[in-house]
Image (spheres, rainbow, N blue to C red):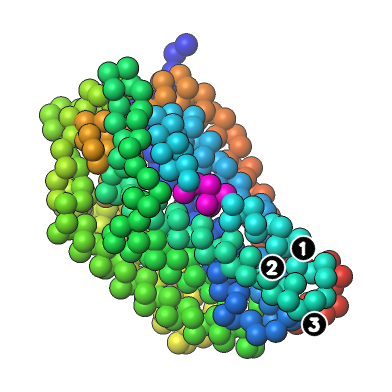
Amino acid sequence: MAIPIDYETLRLIWWLLLGVLLIGFALTDGYDLGVAALLPFIAKDDEERRLAINSIAPTWEGHQVWLILGGGAIFAAWPFVYAISFSGFYLAIFLVLAALILRPVAFKYRSKHDDPQWRGRWDWALFIGGFVPALVFGVAVGNVLVGAPFRLDGDLRAFYEGSLLGLFTPFTLLTGLLSVAMIVLHGAGWLALKVEDGAVMDRARRLGKLAALLVILLFAIGGVMVGVMAIGYRIEGAVDAGGPSNPLWTTSVPAAGAWLDNYGRQPWTLIAPILGFAGPALAYVAIVRRRQALLFAGSAMAVFGIISTVGLSMFPYILPSSIDPNSSLTVWNASSSHLTLWIMLVVTLIFLPIVLAYTAWVLKILFGRVTLDDVRTNPDFY
């Protein structure tokens, strides 16, 4: 079968598509997680909590498709990455899934009973369903940056030698807190767009200001730590970008500050960290000036810039190994076959526009603010 796109280009396309899916998840389900994480702090009574909950209630289920697509893309395009990360990070992934499973149960059950204690417990369950995934995803990204403790033997069998507690280090906790601050800012931006002007929006703005400042501070500290600590890997020798997938054919070495190399080679990539700083700064200004749409645009810019910074900094690495750098997985040495990438690309080009069109249509249909009057009178609301 003649494939019209060469192997190297297909690998690069799938690297870009993986980034699109991860950013898509953070931009959509990210504000759902952010609203849930903010819930105990922005709403003081049941009506206010229902106001916040129903700002995301119609869309949160559909947004999870981005997470499923991201996992599917890793499985199809980067089987080594899927096998090692999903098995090595099993307990961390279990924590995320448990929290995400708790979220729909809380949505469905909190309003089944009028007892304030009953509803309060489910509201804290929603908080866990928002806070825990945001934190663990950030910690996971931090571990990807420093390298995961795995190795491959001569038969390409993977051996993971880490533990759940080993995932939490000062640097990875910083990236986890950055993730939480970023998601909370995005949630505050969504609330500013979706709920009526009042106490809930005012509290969301105040917490959004704090989150914006924390995003800037933590992102800056993280960048300094990457530059001065032994964080980063470099490939030694020639790289066959169109050759067969075999991680053991690549020679990698740990190198402090290596994740900053791409900015010198390709200065245009600096736009990612610039957006990572400009987004929360714009959001902060928007909060001060009470510009709701600009606040959400700033939080979305922060999400895009910060996630893009990680991907562009690490390229071509996807999952480096901290105990055996030569087992590190890159865009060029860990992908599926040429034919598999091509078939999956055709499938993606058919179905991804459908997902995007459906998401846009839903947001258009549900455009408008949720009001306390809606909460009091609409029988379909949670």
Which residue is denoted by mark 3 in the rendering?
A: 373
Local secondary structure at mark 2: helix
**Contact? badges 1 and 3 (CB < 8 Å):** no
Question: Horizontal placement of 242 versus 2: left or right?
Answer: left
User: Which quadrant of the structure image shows residue 271?
Assistant: bottom left
Q: Are marks 2 and 1 in contact (CB under 8 Å)?
A: yes
Image height of 132 relative to 234, above or below: below
Q: Tell me which secondary structure the magenta stretch mostly adopts.
A: helix
Q: Amino acid at mark 3?
A: Asp
Badge 3 marks a residue whose secondary structure is helix
Question: How far apart, in angstroms, are the residues tagged by discs 3 and 2?
Answer: 23 Å
Residue matched to label 2 = 122
Q: For the point 45% across and 19% down, which residue is it?
A: 339
> Horizontal and vertical percent for residue 244?
31, 19
Type of the residue with mark 1: Tyr
- Res 177 seen here: yes
Q: Earlier in the sequence, mark 3 or mark 2?
A: 2
Left or right? Give the position of 189 relative to 257: right
Residue in the image at 52% along x and 28% along y = 344
Q: Residues within 10 Å of mark 1 (few under 14, many from 20)?
A: few
Task: Choose the circle earlier in sequence order: 1 or 3.
Answer: 1
Q: Which residues are magenta?
A: 92-97
> In this figure, which residue is indicated by the disc labeled 1?
109
Q: Is residue 301 above or below residue 243?
A: below
Q: Nearer the viewer, mark 1 or mark 3?
A: 1
